[in-house]
Amino acid sequence: MKPSAILLISCPDQKGEVAAIADFVFRHGGNILHADEHADEESGLFLMRVEFDPKDFDIDLSHFNSAQFNPGQMAHSSSTQTGLSEFAEQFEPIATKFQMKWRLALSSYRQRAIIFVSKYDHCLVDLLYRQKSGELACDIALIISNHPDNQPIADFYKIPYEVVSVTKDNKGAAEAKIQSLIDQHRPDFMVLARYMQILSNDFVNRYPRRIINIHHSFLPAFVGARPYHQAFERGVKLIGATSHYVTEVLDDGPIIEQDVVRVSHRDTAEDLIRKGRDLEKVVLSRAVRWHVENRVLVYGNKTVVF
């Protein structure tokens, strides 16, 4: 696919916003490839994703070396972003007029990820395969685990693997070690691929909307541990999986993707676990793909996925 620029916007809903954005792209030589929008009546909020061809754009974005650009903040990059600064300056009158929060991303930038995993390997293997095959346009810099079990999988895909043991007595030290690994590898986002540890609020708050989790339940039902056993005991007819951004509240962050499968009275708890694992892989991979393609806009505790 040809390189594109992606502009994501949220602002109060009012007349003229789409026209102003389209006119801005046109006046600067861009060609809009895709435009998606949503007006949330309850909150009065307008959200939009505009993807355009920057080949003839009169603001040079070719040296944009970051996952995304927010006005006033250079995200994850120490290089000089002259083109992006010029974009912000040129776009500022429109942003101010319509009270826009916005960010800009380039499809050519490959985001860096760290995957966290415990013993269950199905989500990890699925993500690594999809990344290797080109389905996930990102780079996996490191795998962190609290168990050594998945080292052979990491070795097969030639990805560094760090074991950070976590016990009830060393959680602070373990998290400090994890933080040092993050500082070393500088990921754009992280994925909890069945990482069976609860991260501290301090840790989570350092990375808002940058930690993606898979929960083996159709949230908000059956939060916490052993959700398939909870579902079995309740006699549900559908089980599901949920991928969401991690927040301070356990299993309560903005939901990116969910899916379900039908079960029956003949299914055991082990059958539910087996069927659920298939769902978990698909749901997590979709969420990661949509994140790296800059398709997710968060507002409140909700998301819009364009």
Image: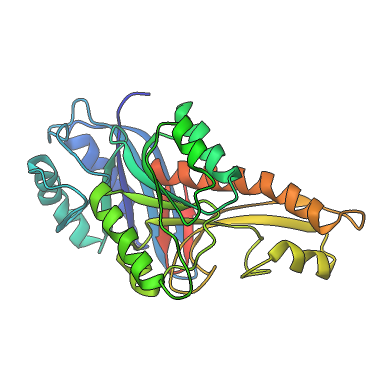
Instruction: Identify which residue, 11 or 288, lies in the foreground.
Output: 288
Total numbered labels placed on residues in the image: 0
Viewport quadrant of the N terminus:
top left
Place of residue 260 in the rendered image (x, y in percent of width and height, measured from the top left):
71, 52
The image shows residue 295, relative to residue 52, as above or below, that is below
Q: Residue at x 41, y 57 (%)?
A: 164
Q: Is residue 67 above or below residue 230?
A: above
Q: How far across and down, in percent of the image, does residue 158 sit?
A: 40, 31
Residue at 27% in and 60% down? 100
Q: Nearer the viewer, residue 12 or 249?
A: 249
Vertical arrangement, residue 270 with respect to residue 67, above or below? below
- Of residues 146 and 42, which is closer to you in this image? 146
- Give 293 or 98, whichever is nearer the viewer: 293
Give the residue at x 37% y 65%: 174
Q: Residue at x 39, y 52 (%)?
A: 190
Give how far across and how far down residue 199 sits, in percent: 43, 68
Can residue 223 be seen in this snapshot? yes
Outermost residue to the right: 266
